Amino acid sequence: MSLTVRVIAPDKTVWDSAAEEVILPSTTGQLGILTGHAPLLSALDVGVMRVRPGKDWVAIALMGGFVEVENNEVVVLVNGAERGDTIDREEARSTLAAAEARLAATDQSEDKQERYEAQRDFKRARARLQASGEVVQI
């Protein structure tokens, strides 16, 4: 028996297939899902979701959202998502460097909105680079 996993973003379905295991970035930490998991509804943070359809893992960058688990069905509704194997690693590195610079520039800023947006962009850029397979220091 396996899980049915769907990752749905506003513009596309990123994943719709069976899997043996799923690891999700919830707002309270990593959340592992196996067959027979109790019903669950949880908020998701920006981060990397890992799906194991067989022997190998597939990484998907998630941009926050929600997950519902019930009857071996995992439905992930997110603001945005991108499979790691489709991400250009060089572009992701460049985006992360720019996001780090912007975040550093807001260290002394009094503008809370600007600081929040810089932190959000940094987390998204880091998740994309991690999903591409790059080891990223936290």
Image (spheres, grey):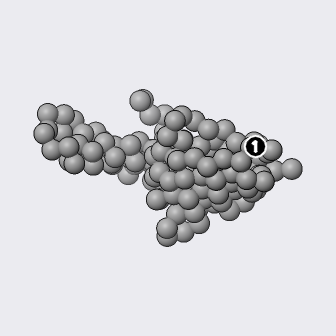
| Residue 109 visible to an observer of this rendering | yes
Quadrant containing the C terminus is top left
3 relative to 60 in the view: left or right: right
For image coordinates 52% across by 47% down, the residue present is 44
| Residue 54 visible to an observer of this rendering | no
For image coordinates 57% across by 63% down, the residue present is 8
Q: Quadrant of residue 17?
A: bottom right
As drawn, the residue found furthest toward the bottom would be 11
What residue does disc 1 label?
Answer: 37
Residue 29: % across, % down: 54, 34
For image coordinates 77% across by 52% down, the residue present is 72
How many numbered dots are placed on residues in this image?
A: 1
For image coordinates 20% across by 47% down, the residue present is 114
Of 135 and 51, the residue lying toward us: 51
Of 76 and 95, the residue lying toward us: 76
Residue 122: % across, % down: 34, 43
28 relative to 17 in the view: left or right: left
